[in-house]
Image (cartoon, coloured by chain):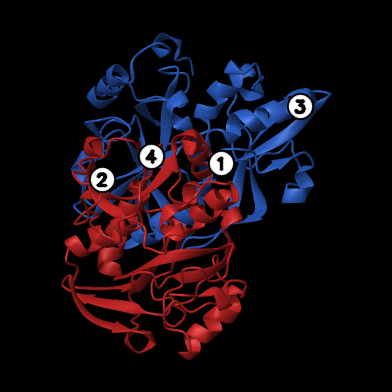
Chain colours: A red, B blue
Amino acid sequence: MNNSEFYSASPKEVRRLIRSGALTGQTSGMCAGYAQANLCILPKEQAFDFLLFCTRNPRPCPLLEVGDCGSREIKEMAFGADVARDIPKYRIWRGGSLEAEVTDISDIWRDDFVYFLIGCSFSFEAELLEAGIPVRHIEEGRNVPMFNTNIPLKSAGAFGGNMVVSMRPIPHELVMKAVSVTAAMPRVHGAPVHIGDPSLIGISDIASPDYGDSVTIKKGEVPVFWPCGVTPQNVLMNSKPPFAVTHAPGHMFITDVKNHELKY
Amino acid sequence: MNNSEFYSASPKEVRRLIRSGALTGQTSGMCAGYAQANLCILPKEQAFDFLLFCTRNPRPCPLLEVGDCGSREIKEMAFGADVARDIPKYRIWRGGSLEAEVTDISDIWRDDFVYFLIGCSFSFEAELLEAGIPVRHIEEGRNVPMFNTNIPLKSAGAFGGNMVVSMRPIPHELVMKAVSVTAAMPRVHGAPVHIGDPSLIGISDIASPDYGDSVTIKKGEVPVFWPCGVTPQNVLMNSKPPFAVTHAPGHMFITDVKNHELKY
């Protein structure tokens, strides 16, 4: 994708184009400096356990905002935005199976729906780049490599499993800087969960990610692993809830909050 | 109260005495160094909104642990403890009115109950003392003075209102140190919400606290205000839930987690 024409656009303007149906693609590279968020929507019946799950596992599931039961209105992250129309592509799931991909869910919205906006590593990648730390998958125009691990999560009701991590190869002399930069941003996953040997967290082949694309690891670079926002979606789908909505991969909610502000 | 004989006792031993009925008094000063927690118990029907409320207002309502629906077992804060028997005194509320004070709620426990353990300023007071900062109400053998304020909270469902704060007079040259010490402990309220002039947060008379006792403010001292764990109980009671259980004031849950560990 090439979103360079929206690099400097305001989130409000981009969300307007998304709502009108003019933009339906991935949001990577849009509205530079502003946080983008993962979306999960569940009926209230499942929402308590999912909220509990996220509260117990804030590293992979950092909650940016959770809606009141039945409310489509976003307040904190983008005042007045509509969670049912302002995301370019949604996935509708029944019993854990993908039923449809749509660009608007206002027609199927129900009074018992609860939305969850969850922090995304796009936010800390912007800070890594600012700090002079290369982000390989951006350089190579690929999706970040993501892996299933053996790191257990704290379960809640039907929700449980292991952590999914994203991997970025970091020049060894910049690893501590990358830790410091991301540790300061706990609302978007925070510090790495692991540095170095992938086998210690149950990853057998660093060249074969479970999600996303493989990237080059150069001589002198160390693989560094961060908690990944795919974790909550994965956990959600594994529990095969009767009904759920998520964003389509890469089609995120663009907030009015600067990445920088997520430090506080 | 004088709990000096339990000052160095282990939390496990004290909880055993509480469970047996041998200890039914306040827990202040017991098990030095270990965190104590506030308790709220709600049926699942109200628990989602209360969990959401705490998530939205982490400063006054820092969640230390939330139970699975129906579970009495504590896992993180004191492995194997029983939330229905290991607190010295409980208050049972119906429709917002106090119905009874009891020392055991195992006979009324229901499968839809959810417990909330919420961080308590006892934890950061220990750290203030360690840092050489005086804590007046401890010196004077009183309860900390607490005040209603005009600081609005983010509401969730039936739960909303203003923040309750606790006040400690701090020598002016130690105020920044007190901020730093407590800012490092976000799981037990974190940094102050206000320093100085009480009228700016809606407190008309610093000598007349709404809860707890008045304490001496000496020349050269500044009143410093922290978010207070009375907030969630207040908000809970104001919503007049059909049924709720809380700890009786000062009769806290003593955890196996050191105050020090709440920094991480």
How much space separates mark 4 and mark 1, taking CA atoms? 52 Å
Do marks 3 and 1 both belong to one polypeptide chain? Answer: yes
Q: Is residue B215 left or right of residue B242?
A: right
Q: Amino acid at mark 4?
A: Lys
Instruction: Tell me, yes or no, whether the two marked residues, 4 and 2, touch with CB atoms within 8 Å.
Output: no
Q: Secondary structure at mark 2?
A: loop
Across and down, in percent, residue B103 comes to 30, 33
How much space separates mark 4 and mark 2, taking CA atoms? 33 Å
Across and down, in percent, residue A239 comes to 17, 61
Dot 1 surroundings within 10 Å: few (below 14), some, or many (20 or more)?
Answer: many
- Number of the front mark, 2 or 3: 2
Residue at x 39%, y 86% (from the top left corner): A106
First in sequence, mark 4 or 2: give its number.
2
Q: Is residue A171 above or below residue B219?
A: below
Q: Amino acid at mark 1?
A: Cys
User: Which residue is label 1 attached to?
Assistant: B228
User: Which residue is label 2 attached to?
Assistant: A153
Instruction: Point out which mark residue B37 bears.
Output: none
How much space separates mark 4 and mark 3, taking CA atoms? 63 Å
